[in-house]
Amino acid sequence: MSIIQEFLRYNRQTILPEIGDEGQEKLKKARVLVIGAGGLGCPILQYISTAGVGFIGIMDFDTIEIHNLHRQILYTENEVGQLKALVAKKVVSELNPLIEVVAIPEKLTLENAAVIIEQYDIVVDGSDNFKTRYLVNDTCVELNKVLIYGSILKFEGQIAVFNHNGSKNLRDLFPEMPDPKDVPNCNLNGVLGTLPGIIGTMMAHETLKVILDLPALKNELVLFNTLNWSFTKLNF
């Protein structure tokens, strides 16, 4: 694609004085790993790809199920049973053919976490369990990688940016991983389909701001209740 076509594709964001051509080049050179291509991962992938993040890794070992479709909007009923990472790669590559996208259809483990994460500048965690979240966090701390964190339940979501420019990490906020049996989850308690779209888009927004060196959350946890539109920012 020509320089003119690139200009036309990204013009509405490069005209922002905070971004410009220099910022677009930062996006083009960025390497972002999205862990989890589910409810949060789908909008994250849509927005960072169309913004022009140049290299995106999609890590998810799960397959598409029909109950995913009300919130995981990269997929259709025709793709039920297929691997999310592979389908997401195809859709994202079609959304923006200028960028490079790789699929990693495997589970993140103690054995592969460092090898995979070290290849990226920023990790965006859209996983849905504490074991993975803490593994991602600890690996990012070890490798000094920025981590964009988010979680959702029912009508509520939260986001934070960890390990960025000397900021704190997940264990500074929640030192020990809770017992999964004591924590409610979407499988049992449900989630309105638009909620991961809202929180995932906020996570994508923070990801782009980090790449662009714009002010991002620092030692702050944003709590967002979409049922009554209450927005709380906690310092930690």
Image (cartoon, grey):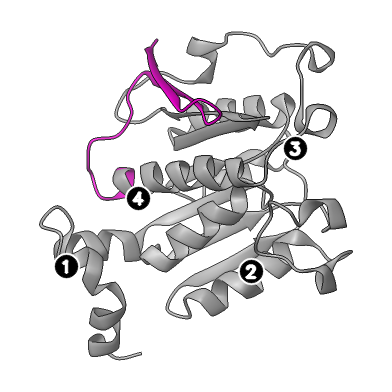
Lateral position of residue 16 relative to residue 89, left or right: left
Q: Which residue position holds label 4?
A: 208
Q: Position of residue 216 (x, y in %)?
A: 29, 34
Q: Say which residue appears at 79% left-offset and 27% top-offset.
A: 189
Quadrant of the drawing holding the N terminus: bottom left
- Whether residue 139 is visible to the viewer of this picture, yes or no, is no
Helix, strand or loop for disc 4: helix
Give the class, few, some or many, for how many residues have Cα within 10 Å of label 4's Cα (few <14, many ≥20).
many
Q: Could you tell me which residue is drawn at 82 percent across and 70 percent down?
A: 79
Task: Give the quadrant of the C terminus.
Answer: top left
> In the image as oriented, which residue stretches furthest toward the front?
228
- Kindly identify which residue carries mark 2: 89
Report x, y in % for residue 67: 84, 51
Q: Which numbered tag is attached to residue 21? A: 1
Q: What is the CA distance from the residue labelled 3 to the residue labelled 1?
A: 38 Å
Q: Give the residue pinned by disc 3.
A: 109
Q: Which residues are magenta?
A: 210-236
Between the C-alphas of marks 2 and 4, the distance is 19 Å
